[in-house]
Amino acid sequence: MGFSSIDDLVNEISNNGKFLKIPFQKTSNNGVASAAGRWHEALQWSGLPGPVTLTGTPGTASALSSTTAGALPIGANVSPDTRHLLNALMLSPTATAVPATFILADFLALYPSLAVTGTPSTLTPVALPRYTTGDGVLGVVTVAAALGAASPALTFTYTNQAGTAGRVAAAHTAPAASAPLSTLFLTDGSPFIRLAAGDTGIRSVQSYTIAAGTTGSASLLLCRPLATIPLLAINTASERDFLYQLPSLPRVEDGACLGWMVQVGGALVTGGLMQGTVDLGWG
């Protein structure tokens, strides 16, 4: 349904109580210092909520939801109403974390504990629980167990948003040798797997190849990015208003598994802290 006007929004959240403020506080557990410009996911980080487990039977995909341990607690389903992002606030007391760019995403599926040397893990796909065609769904690869002294490159074969199988993505590479836990692989500096020309999303992933393999493991996550918030300085909050700033009022689907990704401005130390709030409303 959404909101028909500003008056309707105010009425829904003030008179009808259709509002939720979610506080969060995440502490990096990368084990060693990162480097400026690196991307990380905060799903595996400890804090509030706790860490999401991104390991499991290698390659056997599972769907993620709001009931997944470690997801931001968005509450019960609100259908036939629709839930929307209203506001987000972020701050950090960790000097090596800033300046930073944070992306809030709905994480849909996990392909865990992929081999990054030798024979690739066999992938067993799962149907997407939300955004079921795959349109707008992107892939990220995170270090699930610290890598050895090399930078493996993984090339995925996937089914696109139109249901066309056998599509081949660009190689996705660890940003440095011995990349620590939670580090995201990159293609030309982007944490998102670069799709074949003309594709707008991933419905499922069938297989991958390995180059420059090493020890450790990686996990593939399919996600739908929802919002971005910059953080410029230590101990100085940044706030993003999703009512008046475009894209306005991004929708948060029932069952969404919300979590953060971050590009850090310095050599992020283990124990680095990020915290803030996310405001949701529905009507």
Image: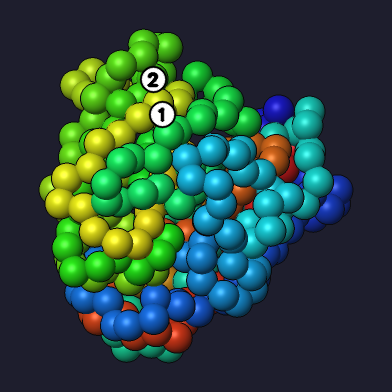
Residue 190 visible, this angle: no
Question: Dividing the picture into quarters, in which one does residue 47 lie?
Answer: bottom right
Q: Vertically, is 148 above or below 275?
A: above
**Dot 2 and dot 1 residues touching (CB under 8 Å):** yes
The residue positioned 69% from the left and 41% from the top of the image is 255
Mark 1: few, some, or many residues within 10 Å (few <14, many ≥20)?
many
Residue 92 horizontal/vertical position (percent): 43, 82
The residue positioned 83% from the left and 53% from the top of the image is 17
Mark 2: few, some, or many residues within 10 Å (few <14, many ≥20)?
many
Could you tell me how far apart the alpha carbons at marks 2 and 1 are, in whole angstroms? Answer: 6 Å
Question: Dividing the picture into quarters, in which one does residue 25 lie?
Answer: bottom right
* Numbered circle sitting on residue 205: 1
Q: Vertically, is 83 above or below 36?
A: above
Name the residue furthest right.
16
Q: Vertically, is 233 above or below 184?
A: below
The residue positioned 29% from the left and 62% from the top of the image is 215
| Picture quarter with the N terminus | top right
> Is 87 or 44 nearer to us in this picture?
44
Position of 191 compared to 22: left or right? left
* Numbered circle sitting on residue 159: 2
Position of 126 compared to 59: left or right? right
Q: Amino acid at mark 1?
A: Val
